[in-house]
Image: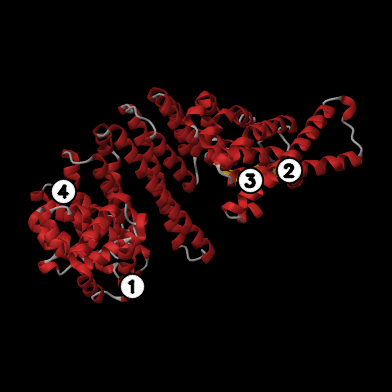
Amino acid sequence: AVSGAADEACFARVYHMFMPVVMRVLQAARDHTVAQHRKQSQPEGRDMAPRSLEHDLWMQELVSNTVHCIGVLAGLSSRQMFEKDAKQVMTLLATLQQASGASSPCQERVLEAFTSISHTLKEGFGPYLTYTIPPLLRVLETKDEDVYHSVPEDEQEGLDQEGKEGYELYIINVRGLGRQRVAVNTIKIDEMASACLQLSEYARNLPNAFIPFLQESAKRIFPLVSYQASPRVRLPAVQAAPSIIACATSKAPSEGFQLLMVSLKHYARAIEEEVEPSYMEVSLMSLSEAIDGVRTQLSADTCESIDKLCCEVMKNSLQRRAEYKNRLSDESVDDEEREEIQGDIDAETKMTGAVIEVVKSLLRNTGNKYLNIFSRRLLGLFSGFLRHPLPALQNAGLCCLSDVMEVAGQNPTTIKYAAKLTPIAVQKCKSSDSVDVRHSAAYTLGVCAQILSRQEFGQYYRESVVALVRVIEMGSSPTQGDDHGAAADNAISALAKVAVGMGVEAKREILGRWLFYLPCNTDFEEAKKVHRQLCEFLSNEHDAKVLYGDGKRNTPKLLSVFAEVVERGEQIADQETITAIRRHIITLLDQLGPNGFEKILSMLDTEQRRRLQKVAAALRK
């Protein structure tokens, strides 16, 4: 507790005073644990007196707390501070781990300490993986019968099962079998989940040192991706798989690709058998990350099978949505159940977003090879969503098609998509009551302006500007909330893309007004793009002249925008943009002189004036 609250100087004193004492305690506890382990391995040492048993329980607690303390100290210290103690600490912990037995509560504390130490030592922890990984792999060898078994409906037998140490009774949904009553060993479940997550962390943070354990880790973790006994194991395994694949790719692209191909059957089974949309979302996002983690192009057959899987997922989702609609129309459904149904609907929406991420990953991996496959099945499904009465599905259709165009880039297929999509996006910006739909429609218009030629987009130019301005102005009020602000930021970004795509005359018409919508503050990702685009406009003599306006009348607005971007920093602008903006401010300050700067300040409101003075003072130092 003291270590966690201490500042850097205070912590250094605490560490140097306390760590030697803790290590002596740990060494004594380790020696006791080793001796006890040897004693219990002998027949005459198994029957223990009550006092001896009480002492051993006390010692177990002492060992557990001491290991936890070492983990805290190691996790809070710098690498330089801890490095001199690292070898002795790791040797003590490894010996203790071997002596304490797999079922000891100390095991979890030791693994937690290893994780803290790995964060501190970073790549310096690599040599110690030989201590930490084998026990994790042994945990993942647990047999199914040691984790769970079905329980008859007999109530008393169920109660007996629940009384067993570490077991809990659950009712689970199994596809094809329905609701099943099972007894689950939650201690084993938690150990397996922790092992998956720690192996993932080592693979991600220490890829070179992890390479000797790659194949064995993949052999243990990949089957758990489709582990049906518990999502508490399945989801950590799903989250770990991409780290294993990326680590293999860093060793050799062919090895990463080979592991991806091995994992695909487990992903497919997990997604096909999953009954919870929220869990399916995790599996789909993991599959997307796994595909992004390889550098070898997938075959057309592999893309086809993944595409079919995604199509089936979406069809099943639509069926579930229809069921939710029927249940909501039932007047006997109470408020609590309605809230639960709405939660299920939200989970379907998030899962649909995960399907779109898989589509994008396939496009990034294979380019036009997958685009042709997408056009045969999923294109029709997502295009149909644009006419669906549910705003969530309209939004999904816009998101999917705009993302496909953006990732695939300009080609004959995406030009066809954009030509059909532009008038739809214009209409939804102008008339949709859903802020999410307006948000996606605005983003889509920006992508269409990049994909279509000036002549092709020109027929929608005027309407697009009017539509985007509507979205911006609907989100300009601070009372509207972040959703409206994010939609406005995307419309501001799209308006800049329209200006760039349509050329000099469009810039002359748009940029002066566009400047007064800045800065973007809600959608941070889009804000960075917009502020980068502002700097690009200013680097062009013609565009800069339009932005500054006649007689440089827009200088106060530009300085106000610059100051806010610099003050907000990397939240709304990348470092390169911030550096460029600082240069613009310094140039303007030199041009204005003290009197001119005071005049600019007088044109700003109180908050703008405070911000600009603060930024200007910092730049003058």
Indicate the secondary structure of the residue bearing disc 4: helix
Name the image quarter holding residue 99.
Answer: top right
Dot 2 crowding, Cα within 10 Å, few <14, some 14–19, many 20+: few
Q: Residue at x 40, y 52 (%)?
A: 349
Indicate the secondary structure of the residue bearing disc 2: helix
Quadrant placement of the C terminus: bottom left
Residue 374 position within the rendered picture, expressed as x and y whole percent measured from the top left: 28, 38
**Label 3 vs label 1: CA separation?**
44 Å
Pointer 3 or 1: first along the chain: 3
Q: Nearer the viewer, residue 584 or 326?
A: 584
Q: Is residue 4 left or right of residue 487?
A: right
Pointer 4 or 1: first along the chain: 4
State the residue position of label 1: 607
State the residue position of label 3: 73
Q: Nearer the viewer, residue 485 or 146?
A: 485
Can residue 250 be spotted in the picture?
yes
Residue 163 position within the rendered picture, expressed as x and y whole percent measured from the top left: 76, 45
Image colouring: secondary structure
Dot 1 crowding, Cα within 10 Å, few <14, some 14–19, many 20+: few
- Residue 21's tag is 2
Q: Mark 3–mark 1 contact, CB under 8 Å?
A: no
Indicate the secondary structure of the residue bearing disc 3: helix
Pointer 2 or 1: first along the chain: 2
**Label 2 vs label 3: CA separation?**
12 Å
Dot 4 crowding, Cα within 10 Å, few <14, some 14–19, many 20+: some
Q: Nearer the viewer, residue 528 or 216?
A: 528
Report the mark closest to the observer, 2 or 1. Answer: 2
- Residue 106's tag is none
